[in-house]
Image: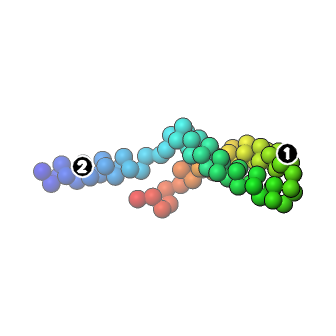
Amino acid sequence: MFIDQIYISAKRQKAVKTSERWSRSLLKSISWRIIGTLDTILISYVITGELIFALSIGGVELVTKMILYVVHERLWNKINWGKK
């Protein structure tokens, strides 16, 4: 019985350490970028006073930072440091 408990506990710990799927990382990236892009558009508009220019900045920033976030997330997913 004690050995069974150790085996089940080890199996649960292993399940917790599994990496995220690409789809989860992508969805997290999209939701975060929506918030970040709205912030960038607002700041750009406040600074420039031009809505079209602010939307252009936000559009470019949306695409580039989404790609960078997914790459960053996937690289950190490979690092075991700080995981339990």
Residue 64 visible in the displayed image: no
Q: Residues within 10 Å of mark 1 (few under 14, many from 20)?
A: few
Quarter that holds the C terminus: bottom left
Residue 58 visible in the displayed image: yes
Identify the residue shown where x is 52% and y is 41%: 24
For the residues bearing labels 2 and 1, Cβ distance under 8 angstroms: no
- Residue at numbered disc 1: 52
User: How far across and how far down the image is residue 13, in percent?
Assistant: 34, 52
Q: Splitting the image into 4 quarters, where does residue 62 fall? A: top right
- Residue at numbered disc 2: 7
Q: Residue pushed farthest left? A: 1
Direction from residue 12 to residue 5 in the image, left or right:
left
Q: Residues within 10 Å of mark 2 (few under 14, many from 20)?
A: few
User: How far across and how far down the image is residue 44, in percent?
Assistant: 81, 56
Q: CA distance from mark 2 to mark 1?
A: 60 Å
- In this rendering, the answer to whether 11 lies above or below 82 is above
> Which of 73/8 is in front?
73
User: How far across and how far down the image is residue 67, in percent?
Assistant: 69, 44
Looking at the rendered structure, the kind of residue marked 2 is: Tyr
Q: Nearer the viewer, mark 2 or mark 1?
A: 1
